[in-house]
Amino acid sequence: MYDPLAKKLTGYAWLYPFIETVLGILFLTKTKVQLALLFTLFILGITTLGVTKVLLDKKSIQCACLGTALKLPMTEATFIENAIMILMAILMLV
């Protein structure tokens, strides 16, 4: 509902959890870390743009952070979490 790329490419929306899983495995195994960081920046950058738009439009939508298990509203905390992860990825690349 808030990822601009997933809105245009429904296949990407279905692949997103698997992409995150692969990135997590790459980080845990310390394999292709630079590549994983670049993909993380790309994915989080797009998602953060969508989160920012939702927050600026003052829309009330459910955050997909924990899937459908918990009904959590998207708040500024979602933006802050994404921003911190982007900052960490940038710092790890430097």
Image (tube, helix red, strand yellow):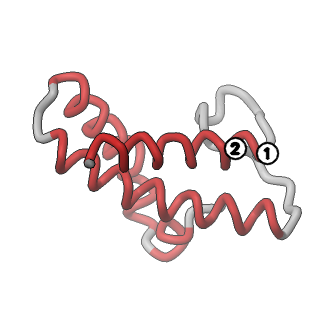
**Quadrant the N terminus occupies:** bottom right
Q: Is residue 25 above or below residue 22?
A: above
Q: Nearer the viewer, residue 88 or 77?
A: 88
Q: Amino acid at mark 1?
A: Thr
Query: What's the residue at 79%, 60% (across, down)?
Result: 55
Decide: marks 2, 1 in contact (CB < 8 A)?
A: yes
Badge 2 density bin: few <14, some 14–19, many ≥20, Cα 10 Å: some
Please report whichever mark, 2 or 1, sits nearer to the chain's N-terminal start.
2
* Residue 66 percent location from the top left of the image: 60, 31
Query: What's the residue at 62%, 65% (across, down)?
Result: 50
Q: Is residue 8 above or below residue 33?
A: below
**CA distance for labels 2 and 1:** 8 Å
In screen coordinates, is 60 left or right of 72?
right
The residue beneath circle 2 is: 63
The residue beneath circle 1 is: 75
Query: What's the residue at 38%, 55% (across, down)?
Result: 41
Q: Quick one: SS at disc 1?
A: loop
Q: Is residue 77 above or below residue 48?
A: above
* Residue 4 percent location from the top left of the image: 55, 70
